[in-house]
Image: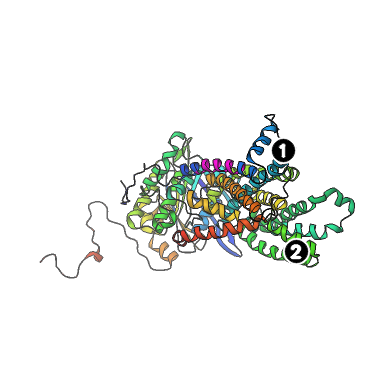
Amino acid sequence: MLDAKNISVAYGNRLVLDDVNFIAQAGQVTAIVGPNGSGKTTLLKAITGEVKCSGETRLDGRILAQMSHADLATRRAVLPQSGNVAFPFTVLELVRLGLTNGCATTDVAAMDALPHAALARVGLSGFEGRYVQELSGGERQRVQLARVLLQIWEPVLDGVPRWLFLDEPVSALDIGHQLMVMQIARDFAEAGGGVIAVMHDLNLTAMFADHVTLLNQGRVKGDGQPHEVFTDDHLSACYGCALRTNTPPPFGGTWLLPQAASQWMEVAE
Amino acid sequence: MSVTSFPSTSKAPTQVGDRRARGALIQTTLVVALICVMLLSLGWGAASSTDVIGALGAKFGVGTANLRDMAIVWDIRMPRMVTGALVGAALAVSGAVMQGLFRNPLADPGLVGVSAGAGLGAVAAIVLGGLLPAAFQAITGSYLVPFAAFLGGWASTLVLYRIATQGGRTSVATMLLAGIALGALTGAVTGFIVYRATDDQLRDLTFWGMGSLAGATWLKLMTAGPIIIFTLLSAPFLARSLDALALGEPVAAHLGVDVQKMKRLAVLSVAASVGACVAITGGIGFIGIVVPHLLRLVQGPVHRTLLPNAALLGAIVLLVADMFSRVVVSPAELPIGIVTATLGGPFFLWILLKNRAILES
């Protein structure tokens, strides 16, 4: 379990996170949502130890601030929002950086084949020899995801869950790959690992997340299962526009989407 | 199995994009080449090759050689060759480490202030050394200039490191900018001292700035060598961290790298070794930028193979340049900095133009 208590972060005089409590369970996908500038990414950075904050974060019982970099790297991997690469690495060379701390798996013999497996997982088999700089934005995002997945290849190591922190993992992806990446997150959680993802797409969040934390102006405005948090009032207030959520009727009910209707009865003719 | 249609290659799939084997092959080639160049360097010049071989053997009790050949090989060429190899290796590795640290292929050790500081130290020693008490001068002798250069380089880097470090974190960007400011200040002080110099001192200053291996002795090597060797040996420990750093400092930290620790090791070891190099050979530019760049083009930027290969190629380049410097205006010697720049400048330009497409993408 990741348990963050009373997290506050200030950039200069501006309070970006104000006394935020955040809990995520292993075996679940936990999403952090909210409008631009609500503090989603800052919260992710606070609970990964990337920015200094007041409050305390515990990762499976251990205080985050007291863990070494090497220790943390075996417990969790972090996918940042954007990543530029300084030198012309090939895709394979970049993905292999996920093996830096050498704890991807306990099976040392399998280590050399893992980067290829990680690339296959994100749909980039055959990209090994390409230069990272030559890839499209979406491909680059998936290469970085492969690197991150490789770092904690086994979702549970020595009986302890490992954690995947994703900052807008689908922001540059087409719809097919969005579904693919969210499914990867789901599978990781179902295998026993923990996933915490900053999300913009509320539909994908509703589809794949077990738990949602809704932020606005640095404060928690909602916390619970997607259907509990994604209410018309909550969302409209946070996002500053009138939003209507919908749910399909229980199985067997007929459901019409008026947007899908055509003007005249062409079908009948 | 994948959604992409990527042209298949004849190579086995596990080898595509993997340049480790190529790096290892280049390493082997460079080792062989370095050994050849080292031997050639010993035999380069007036003593015939049989005399040189004789002198080498005689040292270990095999055969005999006359005293003159023994002196030439063991007291003049050997320390010169070892100095050249170590300095070349250290400059190239330091360049590669700095480029990795600053995440920029144009970074060089000068960025951490060591060159400017060493220059000030050397200039101060040449011009103001005569003002020191005679007894002190007698002790330091010709070692005053290298000693002052090393001290100046090291002190300047420490100051810069202190300025850029706040709350336990060193900002590379601050270091870069503060380095420019500090460099200007150091340059001003250096300029003031140079302004006060006599004509003879000006000549010394000019030649010091061009660099030379001619002053290499066992004693100098004994003092600078351990520092240089320390850097060369610490480089492999930096390799993985430097690779991770290519993705940015936060990502490197998430990958398990203690970024602050590696920055400290990188900056201080580079400052020490470049300071030591500048102290015994004067200013030799160019190797620190070109050697790592060339290697990155042929074997990729992965530091685990880049750093050792840079050491080998750096040593080769400096030894070859040294051989040129000995024959071009024979019997006199051309300062080696002129040779590295004359040979290296056009060559580097050619490589750049050839790879323009890659650079601009």
- Which numbered disc, 2 or 1, marks the residue closer to the eye? 1
Along the polypeptide, which appears first: circle 2 or circle 1?
1
For disc 1, the chain is: B
Q: Which residue corresponds to the image point at 23% horizontal and 55% vertical from the top-left?
A: A253
- Residue B275: image tag: none
For badge 1, the amino acid type reads: Met
From the top left corner, tell me how far across and down residue B23 is, in percent: 49, 44
Q: Is residue B102 left or right of residue B127?
A: left
Q: Which residue corresponds to the image point at 46% horizontal and 59% vertical from the top-left?
A: B354
From the top left corner, tell me how far across and down residue A224 is, in percent: 43, 52
For disc 2, the chain is: B
Residue B31 part of the magenta-drawn span: yes
From the top left corner, tell me how far across and down residue A32 is, in percent: 45, 55
Give, as a single range, the part of the protein colored magenta: B26-38
Q: Is residue B4 left or right of residue A112?
A: left
Query: Gap between marks 2 and 1, in whole Å?
Result: 41 Å
Kindly report the secondary structure that dominates the magenta region of the rendered protein: helix
Q: Which residue corresponds to the image point at 76% horizontal and 57% vertical from the top-left?
A: B122
The residue lying toward the viewer, choosing from B344 and B328, is B328
Quadrant where the C terminus of chain A lies?
A: bottom left
Q: Which residue is mark 2?
A: B190
Label 1 residue SS = helix
For badge 2, the amino acid type reads: Thr
Q: Is residue A63 visible?
A: no
Q: Which residue is mark 1?
A: B70
For this orientation, the residue located farthest to the bottom is A263
Label 1 Cα crowd, 10 Å radius (few <14 / some 14-19 / many 20+): many
